[in-house]
Image (cartoon, rainbow, N blue to C red):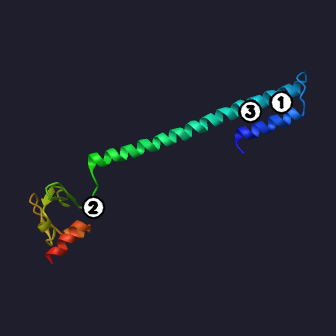
Amino acid sequence: MTITEKVSYIKGLADGLTLDENNKQDKILKAIIDLLDDIALSVSDLEDGCAELGEQLDAVDEDLSAVEDLVYGEEDECDCCCDEDDDGLYSVQCPNCNDVIYLDEDMLGEDSVECPNCGFKFDLDEECDCEDCSDAADEDK
């Protein structure tokens, strides 16, 4: 039962009581019932507006998702040490100096990589377990 239906039920009960307009208590009761009716209608309008707003928000979310796909393209599954760019190179951050190093697929399969900036050698297998890095490593073995 909705709020408006409940208020209508109460109104029906009050009408069945044949409230006297001259009696102060009956007059207050009738005013309260009228107020409840107004509140119930306002709540009903708010619920309808909220539902409509929710539908519009879902449509905007879907549109935004489509725009993101167009602008950013499909996101790679790899969120680890290496990010592939359009040239087929992978960027890896040196754990020592935080310099960005660019590697190709052959270099990803090597046991260790030396940072050209600081000379620090680090192992990619310890840093990364994504499919791209492990596939390149498997091809070299």
Residue 34 in picture, x, y percent from top left: 76, 29
Residue 71 in picture, x, y percent from top left: 27, 45
Query: Label 1 neighbourhood size at 10 Å, few (<14), some (14-19), many (20+)?
Result: few
Q: Which residue is mark 3?
A: 36
Residue 17 in picture, x, y percent from top left: 90, 33
Q: Earlier in the sequence, mark 2 or mark 1?
A: 1
Callout count = 3
Could you tell me the amino acid type at mark 3?
Leu
Query: Label 3 neighbourhood size at 10 Å, few (<14), some (14-19), many (20+)?
Result: some
Q: Is residue 30 left or right of residue 120?
A: right
Q: Is residue 57 left or right of residue 101?
A: right
Q: Which residue is mark 2?
A: 78
Q: Are marks 2 and 1 in contact (CB under 8 Å)?
A: no
**Which label number is shown at residue 132?**
none
Q: Which residue is mark 1?
A: 29
**Nearest the eye: 82 or 19:** 19
Q: Where 7 falls versus 19 (above or below)? A: below
Residue in the image at 29% along x and 55% along y = 75
- The residues tagged by marks 3 and 1 sit, at their Cα atoms, a distance apart of 11 Å
Q: Earlier in the sequence, mark 2 or mark 3?
A: 3
Q: Where 25 falls versus 55 (above or below)? A: above
Q: Secondary structure at mark 3?
A: helix
Could you tell me the amino acid type at mark 2?
Cys
Q: Where 25 falls versus 94 (above or below)? A: above
Query: Label 2 neighbourhood size at 10 Å, few (<14), some (14-19), many (20+)?
Result: some
Q: Earlier in the sequence, mark 3 or mark 1?
A: 1
Q: Where 52 falls versus 125 (above or below)? A: above
Could you tell me the amino acid type at mark 1?
Leu
